[in-house]
């Protein structure tokens, strides 16, 4: 069973930066073959997709974060990252990582809280 642990969140002022990490542990054999993604859930809103990265490094971003966030992965370390720059108050949410395809999802981790003050 693969487990995911998100880290790196915190409180930052608008315009600031944070770098999130997502570490996979457990049975990670072949897990690097999966497209991985970041999601976020703001208070009172549904969880939404933020960005994803394929095993080969191809990336996609939600329009709301394009140009500000950068997703990356280190397959050797079974770790994925999300560099978040020019943060806005509307980026405030709990951030989660998981496999992109819903049919291949594994149990969600606890997420990491990102709070952006205006």
Image (cartoon, helix red, strand yellow):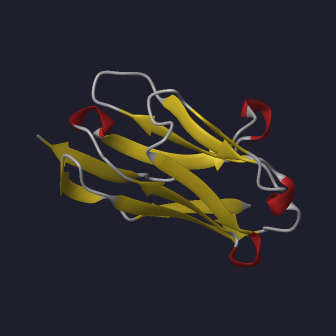
* Outermost residue, top side: 45
The reply to whether residue 107 is visible in this rendering is: no
* Outermost residue, front side: 67
> Where does residue 72 sit, x and y in percent of width and height?
63, 59
As drawn, 102 above or below 115: above
Q: Which quadrant would the N terminus be assigned to in this image?
A: bottom right
> Residue placed at 44% from the left, 53% from the top?
110
> Residue placed at 36% from the left, 44% from the top?
94
Looking at the image, residue 102 sits to the left or right of residue 94; the answer is right
> Dividing the picture into quarters, in which one does residue 90 lie?
top left
Front residue of this view, candidates 104 and 34:
34
> Residue placed at 29% from the left, 22% from the top?
44
Front residue of this view, candidates 4 and 50:
50
As drawn, 60 above or below 71: above
> Dividing the picture into quarters, in which one does residue 100 lie?
top right
Front residue of this view, candidates 79 and 29:
79
> Where does residue 98 sit, x and y in percent of width and height?
63, 47
The reply to whether residue 69 is visible in this rendering is: yes
Count of numbered circles in the view:
0
> Where does residue 36 sit, x and y in percent of width and height?
70, 49
> Where does residue 89 sit, x and y in percent of width and height?
22, 36
Q: Which quadrant would the C terminus be assigned to in this image?
A: top left
As drawn, 113 above or below 72: above
Looking at the image, residue 12 sits to the left or right of residue 4; the answer is left
Looking at the image, residue 106 sits to the left or right of residue 44; the answer is right
């Amino acid at each position: 069973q693969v487990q995911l642990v998100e880290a790196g969140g915190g409180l930052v002022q608008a315009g600031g930066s944070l770098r999130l990490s997502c570490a996979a542990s457990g049975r990670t054999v072949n897990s690097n073959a999966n497209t991985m993604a970041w999601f976020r859930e703001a208070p009172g809103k549904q969880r939404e997709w933020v960005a994803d990265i394929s095993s080969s490094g191809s990336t996609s971003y939600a329009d709301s974060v394009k140009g500000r966030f950068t997703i990356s992965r280190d397959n050797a370390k079974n770790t994925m990252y999300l560099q978040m720059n020019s943060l806005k108050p509307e980026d405030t949410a709990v951030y989660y990582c998981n496999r992109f395809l819903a049919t291949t999802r594994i149990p969600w981790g606890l997420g990491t809280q990102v709070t952006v003050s205006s």
